[in-house]
Amino acid sequence: MKEQKSLPEFSETDTIAVVVNGHLCERQVPVRLLLSDFLRHELHLTGTHIGCEHGVCGCCTVLLDGDAVRSCLMLAVQADGMAITTIEGLAGNRDQMHPIQQAFQQKHGLQCGFCTPGIIMTVYAMLQEHPDPTEQEIRHELSGNLCRCTGYQNIVESVKLAAELLREQHLEVN
Amino acid sequence: MLALLGQYGPDAKVLAGGQSLVPLLNMRLAAPAYLVDINHIAALNYIKAEDGCLAVGAAARQRQVERSALVRQQFPLLVEVVQHIGHMQIRNRGTIAGSIAHADPAAELPALLVCLNGVVVAQSTAGTRFIDAEEFFTGYLSTTLQPDELVTEVRFPSIPPQAGWAFIEFARRSGDYALAGAAAVLTPTADGRCLSAQLGYLGVSGAPVRAHDVETLLIGTTLDDRTLDAAAEEASRIVSAELNDVHATPEYRRALTAELTKRVLRAAWDRRKP
């Protein structure tokens, strides 16, 4: 007779330590918690938006050790020991805007704003790698972020301006 | 790790990049009792050229392959194929081996592996198996991988230096799953005829397809227009009649497969080196 198999008990929570926007956060979290829900519900960083929750819309994009990733396609426990940057940490200061944010404001790169945090995090990662992208490169790199309002034209214009502002800033620093 | 899979295999899923598995979890389409996370296994994170193959370890991400100088120089076809996968954010997490193990018939890498006659290395506590690509994929999201086995490595064979290669797919929006696509490698003879042909298709059937019948038509030809027409017609027969969904009818997919076949063969043949 086949023995009734009983599944072993693993802990349903785990303690993780992540650096979020420069601050070390240690939390006990359910092992099944998504990184996006961890950021929003545990850390109350609600700037990271959740659109489709299956990796299509790009709204939940954050930086994980510098790379743009979908925070809805990762478990929070998988981020243990890693550094995360969200839209709240981009400018480094609540009263300031990052040049990419300034560019989006100036060029009307948003309407309802729901997709904007994900787009700005994607743009940040893109401009780190390609400081002077062509329009085609901008459109290609942004293809993983959906916007229902703008028609993308002003987003592309914003990215061009952001690239310019960041290059100027870079020249001033050096 | 392998012991864990040996113990919980049927109730467990391996979590690599998670770009296919986590959506399935989020939508409650999959509910494994255990996830076995292999992301932290540094020994599985490698890309190396050896024995005429590019060997990619199970933890190596698609973006690593895309950026690798070794792959760019020696396996440009793989870079071209990887750049068609999802979006940059997906490739930053997604792994090469994970895409192979997931075996989505509309995914790019399974079609490439079948085209190149690559090998899947699978390990369990019982030992190591080397599975040919055509033996590995059995149907929709199905493979010959056993519940206690882990894909530890995927091997993409090198192509001859004189061979031309190409990859093409058609998707409605950038980054979407393609309706159909094909990878081709054509090796010429010294007098400009086709010595060998390898063709792999995605999106045309329940599993990625190696098009042996189309390949046979090409051997010995100069890939003139008549040959391309015949190849396109033969290729359209691969399309499964069951692929009738909101995205396209089988008739549309047949016409698309025929046209993509011509284009991929022309592009590969133009890239051959004399």
Image: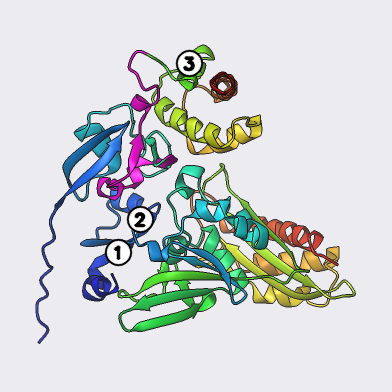
Question: Does the magenta-highlighted stretch encompass residue B152?
Answer: no
In which chain is the residue bearing label 3?
Answer: A
Name the residue tied to disc 2: B21
Could you tell me which residue is drawn at 25 percent across and 76 percent down?
B6
Extreme front residue here? A174
**Residue interval drawn in magenta:** A66-95
Q: Amino acid at mark 2?
A: Leu
| Residue A27 location (% of width, % of height) | 17, 41
Dot 3 lies on which element? Answer: helix
| Residue B258 location (% of width, % of height) | 69, 60
Name the residue tied to disc 1: B13
Q: Is residue B251 in view from this perspective? A: no
Could you give the CA–CA distance between mark 2 and mark 1, rounded to whole angstroms? 9 Å
| Residue B65 location (% of width, % of height) | 54, 56
- Disc 2 and disc 1 on one polypeptide chain: yes
Q: Is residue B11 left or right of residue A85?
A: left
Front position in the image: B161 or A111: B161
Could you give the CA–CA distance between mark 1 and mark 3, rounded to whole angstroms? 44 Å
The numbered disc on residue A102 is 3
Mark nearer the viewer, 3 or 2: 3
Q: Amino acid at mark 1?
A: Lys
